[in-house]
Amino acid sequence: MASVPSVSYSITVRLEVPAGGRAVSQITHVVENAGGIVTALDVNTAGHETLRIDVTIATRDTQHAESIAAALEGIDAVKIHKVSDRTFLMHLGGKIEMQSKVPLRNRDELSMAYTPGVARVSLAIARNPEDVRRLTIKRNSVAVVTDGSAVLGLGNIGPEAALPVMEGKAALFKRFAGIDAWPICLDTQDTDEIVRTVQILAPAFGGINLEDISAPRCFEVEARLRELLDIPVFHDDQHGTAICVLAALTNALRVVGKDIGAVRITMAGAGAAGSAILKLLIHAGARDLVVCDYRGAVHKGRDDLDDSLRWIAEHTNASGYAGDLRGAVKDADVFVGVSAPGILNGDDIATMNDDAIVFALANPEPEVSPDEAREHAAVVATGRSDYPNQINNVLAFPGVFRGLLDAQADGVTLEMLAAAATALAEVVTPDELGPNYIVPSVFHPDVATRVAGAVREAAGGRPRTEA
């Protein structure tokens, strides 16, 4: 896919130019000729002879930014003082901080917030441990835990490199749900050590958000922690993705007038996200599904089935199809991809049924070009922000945890996930619903509150099926 200029690769170039003449217009012309986009131009200082200006430019990638800076330096009488990468500037010193909620202006306030007054609160909690949610940050705190083994699409980059992502996750928790989230980046990829570490940290938190832990280790970590802890354990790569996919599919099926129990669904990806999506789709009523991984369709006759793949084989592919992804897509109504880039093309989508739905969610490059898919499918969604229908986990996890914390839930169930998906889908009104609008914007003011309310209500109901 051809890359386009993006704010993710925007730079600000500080230039010194002659006060008169055509230097400013030359700068804009050079940037545009180089394929960049000038998004802002500010005069920093002005003199009789020269101007110092800051030019902000959207570029395609790091190399493109460097080539634009070099082109600007080639303009006569223009001098570059500094080139700043705006994304790196945003991350200087980290993106989150801790602030006190109470004033500490004098000795009296200090004596209540800390010693000796705080001892009375500690003793009260010791007598009645349930008071910890009422009297401490536990009621509104989530640990965002990673081992750095599967960070975004970057792979196993380790805990230090994962920290900016976990900080970002914590910032999203605060921005969209008012939750205090704390990055916990573990310098181990041993399952036993991860489980034990989270277990002994858990008393300070009201919930655990597992993040960017590779499969199949993430399955065991989550399952064991759910057995050990009395607070919700939520793996966003699995369950957050599943909620968003079910919500989007619910609305996409409304657009094309099909029912989830009657459509044929082909999935690419049998890892953490794929497995969770599959379970939630089945819970929601999907009946005819085929899941493919890098070896082709998952079926009972394969000789490489681990526990997760065996579960998939036993609950899908009733016909025993043993071919490849392209064959599985033929005559399907829905394609859901959480796998690898460029594994399908427009001709493959053309073999699907009429009014097909394509969710190509590999990021940044989807399983099939969205432009090609749109030529043959009625509804197309991606994980990208530069196409309609972006399926983004931030639509789900802030509201889900808000509901879990408010309900003081001790676990996460499929009923809660399904309720969250229904609430998210219903944020899009019938008048708004269409092929290019099946999920709301992440900035829609009703998203987190609607999802939180649905989860809170589901947390008090029965029956409960472990997610």
Image: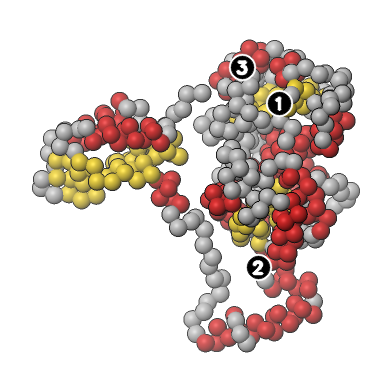
The x and y percentages for residue 272 are 72, 39
Residue 168 is at least partly visible in this image? no
Of the pair 228 and 240, the residue shown nearer to us: 228
Say left or right for 110 vs 311. Answer: left
What residue is disc 3 on? 345
Residue 310 is at least partly visible in this image? yes
The nearer-to-camera label among 3 and 1 is 1
What kind of residue is marked 2? Ile
Mark 2 vs 3: CB contact within 8 A: no
What residue is disc 2 on? 137
> Label 3: few (<14), some or many (≥20) within 10 Å?
some
Q: CA distance from mark 3 to mark 1?
A: 16 Å
Callout 3 secondary element: loop
What residue is disc 1 on? 294
- Please give the name of the residue rendered at 77% of the width and 78% of the height, measured from the top-left corner: 126
- Please give the name of the residue rendered at 67% of the width and 84% of the height, measured from the top-left corner: 119
Q: CA distance from mark 2 to mark 3?
A: 50 Å
Figure quadrant of the C terminus: top right
What kind of residue is marked 3? Asn
